C-alpha cells in the first residue's frame, strides 16, 4: 500500500494522519495540531499524499491510541521477555508492531486516555504527538514496515 492508501486505512479507523517530509520526521504542514482534534478530509489526504515522496505521521491519542516506542531491538527483546510471563501476552502478539530504523513501535489502545511517559530506552506516546508509520522512510533510508499484526 502507498501512503494515501495507508492514510485512508487510518481514517476509516477514526485516527488522524498528517503528511511528513520524505526521509524526515518533520511535518509538511506549518501547523498540524488541529489534527489532534479533527480528522483530515478525503480531499486533504489526496492533496497531501498524491505523490510517492511523502512520509506518513499517525497522530497519537485518537481513540486512546498509544504507541510504545522501543529505542532499540535490545530494549524490545527485554520487554518481550517480561511480557511473555503475563496473561496479556496473547493479546499483545496480535497488535500492530512496526519495525523502525532503531527499534519497534507497538500500537495499542487503552480503555482510558493515557499519559506520555519516558522510560529508559522506551517512550510512551499517548497524546500531543505523532509517530512515523509505514510506508515512511527514515532519514537513514530504512523503511518503516509491519512485522506483526496487520494494517
Image: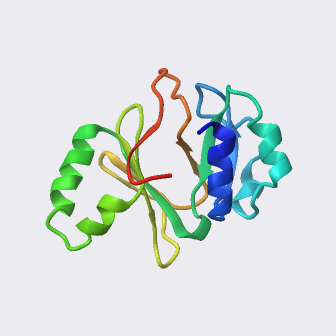
Name which quarter of the figure residue 64 lies in: bottom right
Viewer can see residue 30? no
Where residue 151 appears, x then y in whole percent? 51, 52
Image position, residue 102 (x, y; %): 36, 33
- Left or right of residue 121, residue 60 in this image: right
Residue at 59%, 70% in the rendered image: 63
Q: Position of residue 134 (x, y in %)?
A: 53, 40
Vertical relation: 94 (above or below) 110: above
Which of the 4 quarters of the picture holds residue 29?
top right
Q: Quadrant of residue 98?
A: top left
Q: How many marks?
A: 0
Residue occupying the point 57% across, 58% down: 60
Look at the image and tell me whether residue 69 can be seen: yes
In the picture shown, does residue 144 fall above or below 23?
A: below
Give the colouring mode of the picture: rainbow
Asked whether 104 or 14 is in front, the reply is: 14
- The picture places residue 119, in percent across and down from the top left corner, at 33, 53
Q: Residue furthest front?
A: 1
Give above or below for 47 relative to 130. above
Q: Is residue 128 left or right of residue 138?
A: right
Q: Identify which residue is drawn at 46% across, 72% down.
A: 110
- Seen from the viewer's position, the closer of residues 116 and 61 is 61
Amino acid at each position: 500500500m502507498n501512503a494515501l492508501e495507508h492514510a485512508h486505512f487510518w481514517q476509516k479507523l477514526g485516527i488522524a494522519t498528517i503528511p511528513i517530509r520524505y526521509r524526515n520526521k518533520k511535518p509538511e504542514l506549518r501547523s498540524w495540531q488541529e489534527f489532534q482534534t479533527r480528522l483530515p478530509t478525503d480531499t486533504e489526504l489526496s492533496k497531501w499524499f498524491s505523490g510517492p515522496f511523502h512520509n506518513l505521521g499517525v497522530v497519537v491519542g485518537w481513540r486512546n491510541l498509544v504507541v510504545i516506542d522501543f529505542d532499540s531491538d535490545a530494549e524490545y527483546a527485554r520487554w518481550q521477555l517480561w511480557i511473555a510471563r503475563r496473561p496479556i501476552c496473547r493479546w499483545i502478539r496480535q497488535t500492530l508492531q512496526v519495525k523502525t530504523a532503531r527499534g519497534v513501535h507497538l500500537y495499542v489502545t487503552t480503555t482510558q486516555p493515557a499519559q506520555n511517559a519516558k522510560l529508559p530506552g522506551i517512550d510512551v506516546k499517548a497524546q500531543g504527538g505523532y509517530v512515523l508509520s509505514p510506508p515512511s522512510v527514515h532519514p537513514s533510508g530504512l523503511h518503516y514496515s509491519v512485522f506483526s499484526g496487520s494494517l
